[in-house]
Image (cartoon, grey):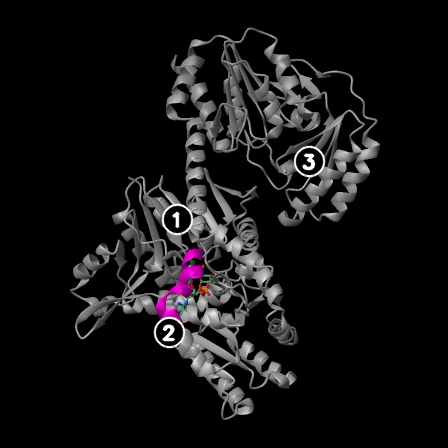
């Protein structure tokens, strides 16, 4: 039976050794509280660190592992040194600040990085120990970004998902990281990469494109022979748990106690881990400004500030704690009176019932992080509002803002705006509060944590199914053997080959993609074999083909079929074509080339092409889309068609395509062996006209009319070499 292996830095339980005895306590934080309401379960295993350094567990590892096994967990043991450098170091002093745009807090340190690599390898060993072949492996968060690739290397066919719980920064910021390639390649070891929002998806895909040079297409990134899916999965919460928790007796008791403490004051609530990304001091400054500007609310409103201690071993967190303490003291000193303390500050984690009591009582939740991957507090607050009252003031820089549009959305750096938002929230009529919350509640109920998990895992399963389909079409050794056998037995053989991307690799400058010293002798020997007819069917112009391949005894097709040249004859046109349309289209292509640095226009006898391989990829893809639209409108009354190749848009006569050119040769003889190989959309016309018995091969792992796929021009050369040698052996 297939199981789900969840892998995260921390297990949902923390083991604490006190007076020689081990005790288990629930862990804190967004990931474990979110996923912890669905897992661990009997058909899953959660793999992670148990929260205590190896040195403190010495001799008790087996016992700990046994305790964890009972809870469907598997422990990863880490030394104090690794915790310092991998967890407090690279994870929390490098990645965390960088990925939240706190560049000045980011430390680049070789020892941190080395520990990060080492610990990811330790995690990999544990995953491999636990995993069965058909398990689904779901790796979480920024501590383990190298793990997908490491696991892939050891378990090549495993179903691996990766989810990042924090933002993925813009490529301009990500590129600052000295180990950027390793991180991207690490993540791309997964089959499915998930983020909270589409912005993060875009940032990731853009970083991959700029740093690794890999293109993305409709949410897929091709890396080697694998296609990695990248998509947004906004994490939900256990809606029922929060919407019904108000009934728990413990919650009612807490409500009473809190009411007694704050009297009938209106309550503004602020809850976060004490982290500089959450904007806690900034929020206190806003509260100060609110009190100053709105004296009528003094002695009427209390801010309950819950700050959960977090990463206390990191200097910036200790500084933050001092700053918050100071600000709370200052505000309470400035506005407080005998019967009223403006800020009630709790520096500790609160039990679940108290959390719900606070959500229930709060008139306003002030959730204003400076950056936040998602922010579950905002969602939990809304879900807990059984009577529908209460107002959420939410930062636009939290991922949750994308889904909670009915909240009052603010820029966390705009203090005046937040002051106004607090006032608006406190004055908002009840009916409006209810209407806004009900809409958000419906959305949260529909996409709860179970839906989120199901969506992610469902998507991963679909990808694996798609990979299995593609694997069936991949040209296997068995198929090659069969092809070689057919080839050997046949007498009249037609070999149709595209040029760029099929026989030779692409180059930034089309003129540089000359045939090299390996490919020329290969074709030369192939055409010498009696019964072989080789035709090179290209989109290039006649002159270039003549210059590069004219000496070979092959058939040639130029401009996708405008011109053909039989072995030993001259170039001829496939039919009379008109060029009248060019004057209308050329200026448009030139205009787009001027607007896109690196793009260029190429004019061939009966076609015009707009090349963008050397242009900035982001800009080029926008321009290419615009150009396509313009051309579609412009050409609707002309007999020309728009063709998309690899980084090129081509306009040419609709009557001309590689299919017609291929037909010319197919009709010449009763061939008993036909093979056609090509790498882009223009070759699909050629595949479409082949007889059923033909072998058709598309270079690259795209869906195609061709029967089989290979990875690259190298595979094509290897295959042609096998065919050539097969003759010598027969
Ligand atoms: C990361 C990302 C993303 C908090 N205090 C108490 C308590 N909590 C629970 C809350 C909530 C969770 O912890 C906090 O989640 P957040 O989402 O707000 O924040 P991070 O810990 O920074 O989490 C974040 C998240 O991962 C999930 O992907 O949303 O952007 O930074 O569930 O309820 N629970 C209890 N007492 C507390 O005092 N019982």
Q: Quadrant of ligand 1?
A: bottom left
Residue 631 in percent (x, y) is at 75, 35
- Give the mark nearest the N terminus, 3 or 2: 2
State the SS at label 2: helix
At 57% across and 68% down in the image, what residue appears?
391
Residue at the extreme bottom of the image, as rendered: 338
Q: Report which residue position mark 1 lands on.
A: 149
Residue at the extreme top of the image, as rendered: 670
Question: Which numbered marker is on residue 253?
Answer: 2
Q: Report which residue position mark 3 lands on.
A: 649
Relative to 36, say whether 473 is above or below: above
Q: Determine the main secondary structure of the stretch shown in magenta.
A: helix
- The quadrant of the picture occupied by the C terminus is top left
Q: Nearer the viewer, mark 1 or mark 2?
A: 2
Which residues fall within the magenta stretch?
A: 238-252
Of residue 458 and residue 164, the one placed in the foreground of this image is 458
């Amino acid at each position: 039976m297939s199981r789900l292996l969840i892998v995260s830095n921390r297990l949902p339980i923390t083991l604490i050794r006190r007076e020689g005895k081990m005790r288990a306590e629930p862990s804190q934080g967004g990931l474990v509280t979110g996923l912890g309401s669905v897992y661990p379960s009997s058909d899953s295993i959660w793999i992670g660190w148990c929260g205590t350094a190896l040195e403190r567990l010495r001799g008790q590892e087996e016992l700990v592992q046994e305790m964890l096994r009972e809870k469907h967990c598997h422990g990863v043991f880490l030394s104090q040194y690794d915790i310092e450098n991998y967890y407090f170091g690279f994870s929390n002093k490098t990645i965390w600040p960088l990925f939240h745009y706190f560049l000045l807090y980011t430390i680049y340190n070789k020892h941190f990085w080395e520990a990060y690599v080492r610990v990811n390898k330790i995690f990999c060993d544990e995953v491999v120990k636990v995993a069965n072949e058909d398990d689904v492996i779901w790796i979480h968060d920024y501590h383990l970004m190298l793990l997908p690739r490491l696991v892939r290397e050891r378990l090549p066919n495993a179903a691996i998902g990766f989810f990042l719980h924090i933002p993925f920064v813009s490529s301009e910021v990500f590129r600052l990281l000295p180990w950027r390639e390793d991180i991207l390649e690490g993540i791309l070891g997964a089959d499915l990469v998930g983020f909270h929002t589409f912005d993060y998806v875009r940032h990731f895909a853009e970083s991959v494109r700029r740093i690794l040079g890999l293109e993305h297409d409709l949410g897929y990134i091709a890396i080697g022979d694998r296609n990695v899916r990248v998509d947004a999965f906004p994490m939900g919460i256990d809606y029922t748990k929060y919407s019904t928790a108000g009934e728990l007796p413990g919650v009612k008791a807490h409500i009473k106690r809190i009411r007694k403490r704050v009297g009938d004051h209106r309550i503004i609530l602020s809850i976060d881990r004490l982290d500089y990304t959450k904007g806690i001091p900034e929020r206190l400054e806003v509260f100060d400004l609110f009190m100053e500007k709105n004296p009528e609310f003094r002695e009427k409103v209390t801010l309950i500030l819950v700050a959960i201690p977090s990463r206390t071993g990191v200097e910036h967190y200790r500084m933050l704690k001092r700053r918050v303490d100071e600000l709370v003291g200052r505000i309470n000193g400035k506005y407080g009176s005998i019967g009223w303390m403006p800020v009630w500050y709790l520096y500790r984690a609160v039990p679940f019932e108290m959390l719900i009591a606070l959500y229930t009582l709060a008139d306003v939740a002030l959730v204003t992080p400076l950056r936040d991957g998602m922010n579950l507090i905002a969602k939990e607050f809304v879900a807990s509002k059984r009577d529908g009252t209460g107002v959420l003031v939410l930062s636009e820089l939290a991922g949750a803002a994308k889904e909670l549009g009915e909240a009052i959305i603010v820029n966390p750096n705009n203090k005046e705006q937040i002051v106004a938002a607090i006032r608006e929230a406190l004055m908002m009529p009840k009916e409006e509060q209810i209407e806004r919350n009900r809409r958000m509640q419906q959305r949260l109920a529909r996409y709860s944590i179970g839906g989120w998990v199901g969506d992610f895992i469902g998507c991963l399963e679909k990808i694996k199914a798609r990979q299995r389909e593609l694997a069936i079409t991949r040209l296997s050794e068995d198929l090659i053997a069969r092809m070689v056998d057919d080839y050997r037995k046949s007498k009249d053989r037609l070999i149709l080959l595209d040029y760029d991307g099929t026989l030779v690799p692409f180059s930034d400058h089309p003129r540089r993609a000359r045939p090299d010293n390996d490919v020329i002798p290969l074709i030369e020997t192939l055409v010498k074999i009696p019964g072989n007819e080789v035709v090179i069917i290209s989109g290039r112009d006649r002159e270039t083909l003549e210059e590069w391949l004219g000496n070979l005894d092959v058939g040639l097709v130029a401009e996708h079929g405008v011109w053909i040249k039989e072995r030993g004859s001259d170039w001829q046109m496939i039919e009379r074509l008109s060029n009248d349309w060019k004057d209308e289209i050329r200026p448009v292509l030139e205009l787009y080339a001027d607007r896109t640095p690196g793009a260029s226009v190429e004019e061939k006898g009966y076609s015009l092409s707009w090349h963008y391989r050397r242009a900035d990829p982001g800009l080029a893809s926008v321009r290419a889309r615009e150009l396509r639209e313009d051309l579609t409108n412009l050409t609707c009354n002309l007999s020309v068609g728009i063709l998309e190749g690899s980084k090129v848009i081509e306009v040419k006569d609709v009557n001309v395509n590689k299919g017609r050119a291929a037909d010319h040769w197919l009709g010449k003889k009763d061939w008993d062996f036909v093979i056609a190989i090509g790498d882009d959309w223009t070759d699909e016309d050629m595949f479409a006209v082949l007889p059923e018995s033909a072998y058709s091969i598309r270079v690259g792992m795209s869906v195609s009319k061709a029967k089989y796929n290979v990875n690259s021009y190298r595979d094509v050369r290897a295959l042609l070499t096998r065919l050539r040698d097969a003759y010598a052996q027969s």
